[in-house]
Amino acid sequence: MSMVTEPRLETGWLPSSPIDDNLLRQFVHNQAVVNEITATALGGRTGRTDDVCLADTGGPISYLNQAILTRPLTAVGDPALATVESFFAPAAAAGRPVTLLSPWPTPDLSTRAWSLVGHPAMVLRSPGRVTHEPAPGVEIRTVSSADDFAIAEHVAIEGYPFDEARGLPARSLFPPALAGSELVVRLGVLDGDPVAVGNVVVAHGLVNLCLGATLPAARRRGVWEALVWSRVNAAPDVPAVAYTSDYSRPGFRRLGFLPITRFTLWMRSR
């Protein structure tokens, strides 16, 4: 008598699920590309399993040392967490902070020494080229030279801000090795001065607006908006996405992006 094994029902996050099964899965794999490019350019480490995508730059910026879950956690003892913590053991030994991004709600991970950062929102805009005339004095440039990477890095550190990056050697956030990669850095210029930065990656059927920062004195001058449309138009035939804090979310909504869901973001540090 033979036993018939029932096929697993498709959930959208099985190891066998196609990446284009759903937009959320596309985003996870796109953001994994963002993290892997950055970690590799900085001489760090990357890894992937069926459960999680991992990247460790070797530096102190928590958002660049990140694990992204590819499926929901089942419990606080889920083996995916052991994989994450094993991968980041060198960071833990050095006292470097790391983050864990879940597209779904998670159990309370505080018993495993994780601290809840918050619930950033994923926003989405449907495909379509945007005709946009930048405000007077606003110009968008694509960064390619070592000097421009250093300028863009300074703007990002001060505009985001990345306090933990202050005092690091130049190009510890945007190394010149990014030139020619899928991660494109764009610089927003106002009246000749670099004042904003925005990164973009086109992968897995999405254009991901994966970092944005503007110096305080240049905010609400049209630079951030010009950077948004510049990056959307990098791949106008596919949806544009970002995961964003509640500070930037109103700006995205004003430009027609729709809030789709909220993620869960944890941090582990010394």
Image: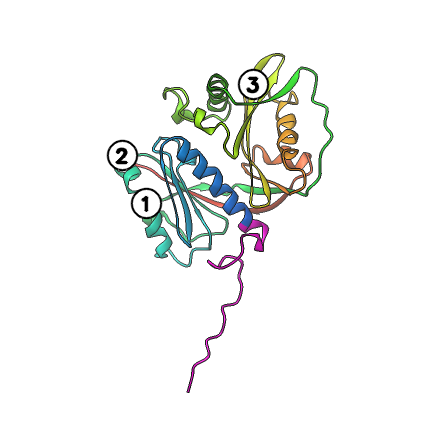
Q: Is residue 18 magenta?
A: yes
Residue under label 1, please give it: 87
- Report, in whole angstroms, how far the alpha carbon at label 1 lies from the one at label 3: 36 Å
Question: Mark 3 or mark 1, which is nearer the start of the sequence?
Answer: 1
Say which of marks 1 and 2 sits in front: 1
Expressed as whole percent of the image width and height from the top left, the position of residue 270 reads: 30, 36
What is the CA distance from the residue labelled 3 to the residue labelled 2?
A: 33 Å
Q: Which residue lies furthest to the front in this view?
A: 180
x and y, in percent, of residue 145 in the image: 50, 19
- Mark nearer the viewer, 1 or 3: 1
Q: Where is residue 257 in the image (x, y as percent from the top left)?
A: 66, 39
Q: Is the magenta stretch mostly helix, strand or loop?
A: loop
- Of the residues shown, which amino acid type is indicated by label 1? Phe
- Please name the amino acid that badge 2 sits on: Ala
Q: How many marks?
A: 3
* Residue linked to disc 2: 94
Identity of the residue drawn at 52% across and 67% down: 9
Question: What separation in Å lies between label 1 and label 2 (alpha carbons)?
Answer: 13 Å
Q: Is mark 3 on a helix, strand or loop?
A: strand
Q: From the image, tell me which residue sits under label 3.
A: 195
Image quarter of residue 235: top right
Residue 183 vertical position relative to residue 152 in the rendered view, above or below: below
Q: Is residue 59 above or below residue 53?
A: above
Question: Relative to 61, is 211 on the left or the right?
Answer: right
Along the line of sight, which residue is nearer the eye, 224 or 238? 238
Range covered by the magenta-colored residues = 1-25
Give the mark, 1 or 2, whose residue is nearer the N terminus: 1
Q: What element carries label 2?
A: helix
* Residue contact between numbered discs 3 and 2, judged by CB atoms under 8 Å: no
